Amino acid sequence: MIYLIADIIAHPGKEKELENSIFTVMAPTKKEPGCIQYDLHKDVEKPGKYIMYEIWESQEAIESHIASEHVKIFLDETKNNNLMKDLIINRCEKL
């Protein structure tokens, strides 16, 4: 299994728009083959920071997810509407 933690930072004033955009990706992602867990969290101390906790069966499942139509639409929307200031993806290992 592969564990990912994505830090997603909204541009100031764009927090709700980014949050809504993220929600559009969640349902189809959870139905993807190889997706074990895909949960969104909001940092209570840092407004505009979201954390996505993901567990995938394989690297192939992650690559398929990244190439999916709903992820492409999400990335285009966040770029075209200047919603996301930063995206940091951390690949983790469970101890």
Image: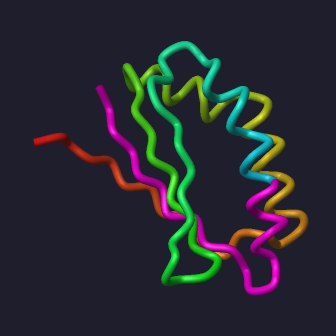
Q: Nearer the viewer, residue 90 or 49?
A: 49
20 relative to 58 in the view: left or right: right
Query: Whole-percent x and y of residue 92?
Result: 26, 47
Q: Nearer the viewer, residue 4 or 59?
A: 4
93 relative to 51 in the view: left or right: left
Q: Nearer the viewer, residue 94 or 76?
A: 94
5 vs 66: above or below: below
66 vs 5: above or below: above
Can you tell which quarter of the image residue 48 is in?
Answer: bottom right
Residue at 20%, 42% (x, y): give it.
93
Residue range (magenta): 1-20
- The residue most toward the left is 95
Q: Quadrant of the C terminus?
A: top left
Please tell me how many numbered marks the rendered image carries: 0
- The residue most toward the top is 33
34 vs 74: above or below: above
Q: Quadrant of the N terminus?
A: top left
Q: Is residue 66 magenta?
A: no
Query: Whole-percent x and y of residue 18?
Result: 77, 63
49 relative to 11 in the view: left or right: left
Residue at 45%, 55% (x, y): give it.
89
Residue at 49%, 83% (x, y): give it.
45
Residue at 66%, 30% (x, y): give it.
67
